[in-house]
Image: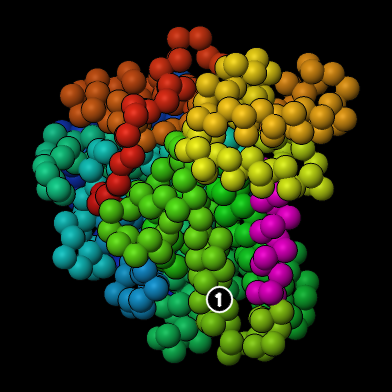
Amino acid sequence: MHTLAQLPFESRYTQLPTRLYQRLRPTPLTSPVLVALSADAARLIDLDLCQLQPEQLAAHFGAGEPLPGDDPVAMKYAGHQFGVWNPQLGDGRGLLLGQVRNDRGELWDLHLKGSGRTAYSRFGDGRAVLRSCLREFLGSEALFHLGIPTTRALCVVMGQGQVRREMPEPEATLVRMTRSHVRFGHFEHLHYSGDRAGYEALMQQVIEDHWPDLLAIPDQAERWAHWYEEVLKRTAELVAKWQAYGFCHGVLNTDNMSILGETIDYGPFAFLDEYRPDAVFNHSDDQGRYAFDRQPKIVHWNLTALAETLTPYVSVSTLEDILARYSDYFQQAYRQQLSARLGLAVEQWPLVERFLQLCREQSVDWTLFLRDLAENKDEKQLLDHVSDQDLFQHWLRHWRKAVDERFDSIEQRVEALCAVNPWVLPRTHVLQVAIEAAEQGDFTEVARQLRSYRQPYQRLPGHEDHAAPPPAGNFVHLSCSS
């Protein structure tokens, strides 16, 4: 176990060409204080929780005090934003502090969001606001415990200064953790810059660090084709889980796509309340490009953009063959996930489709309905969720017949369904309660919600407010601003 000062830093990323980063120190916050800490994330890098003091976290991740061995850099990349090429992207408000290798040999990035202006800030101030830091902190930890691949969040630190977005808001920083912050946009940057040596160096490091088994393939084109298929498969399975649990990312630009197939760059994310497949949560998305039901197609588009960067090394026909497998990977994972939430076999998919159709037509809060179904609530309680009870009664009869054939007992069915249907999710109206309390200096609600999201499939006494439905007509458009 380590104290903060003993973290064994490495700087793998700075071994890459300098066009991929800018070295600089973070800009301190004003009188920073610790708002939130994830003990689960701290254990990933063997931090000794008994010696982890709030003042130390605030000093190192808010006041800019260096950690021994850190080597902060702002990462340079590019990307397609809302489908439009933009070469002027990079960490405009963040710094990769370095990598920490834990006792299991795993290398973890520590990334500070809200650390001040960099060479890639363009017209931004380089700061993050408390609202967005808390949404990412609670949202990413919640997704992890739901079983959805994601970056992790170590802590949030708040300063006493204000930054202006739509209105003045408290400044803050977030420490994000993942095995790699490399994005599709890194490869796009090097490809469209014509930097083949840089591209090859990045690819070599990525494969060494995350797919070492591929190094046994002697032919480079074959090795890289296998790598691309691995990225595609992971990414298809990720978006399948999003769709199965009603998660909408909100801004799926190529620079927001992790090569590890993880959820990254939480901005205007939200979970569906009413089942509205065409829901758009990002108020900047006028055309609905990143609507919930368009996510699988947009992810495929982004994977096509990544494939384009491989064309100097891998044949177009090979890349097209791999891209053509995306639909099968996605559909298989999506149908397995969603069928399991209803206790059905994948072969009973028409019954799942009918359920989704009814939820859409009757604006059902499907999270609450599915949990009540999992807990074997009586028919009256289930039908309270719907407007046309006759249609749902007809579906329920067919559903009960199907699940009775699959489970030996009601108890077995309840156990199986409660294990995949969360009691609580980080819904927008619930997160807002924690944000407003924290902005007033009360951080207890953040800690309460973190406890709920660490056990999303269990009912926690005293946390019923976290599972409450939103007020009627509470649909909210969210901002990308940090």
Q: Which amino acid does label 1 sit on?
A: Thr
In the image, residue 255 lies at what x, y percent? 42, 66
In the picture as drawn, the residue positioned furthest to the top comes out as 461
Q: Is residue 467 left or right of residue 383?
A: left
Whether residue 396 is in magenta: the answer is: no
**In terms of secondary structure, where does tag 1 sit?**
helix
Q: In this view, does 261 lie to the left or right of 222?
A: left
In the image, residue 106 lies at what x, y percent? 61, 48
Assign the magenta stretch its main secondary structure.
Answer: helix
The answer to which of 373 and 164 lies nearer the viewer is 373
Look at the image and tell me in which quarter the N terminus lies. top right
Asked whether residue 376 appears in the rendered view, the answer is yes
The answer to which of 50 and 123 lies nearer the viewer is 123
Q: Is residue 307 left or right of residue 230?
A: left
Q: In this view, does 156 lie above or below 404?
A: below
Label 1 neighbour load within 10 Å: few <14, some 14-19, many 20+: some
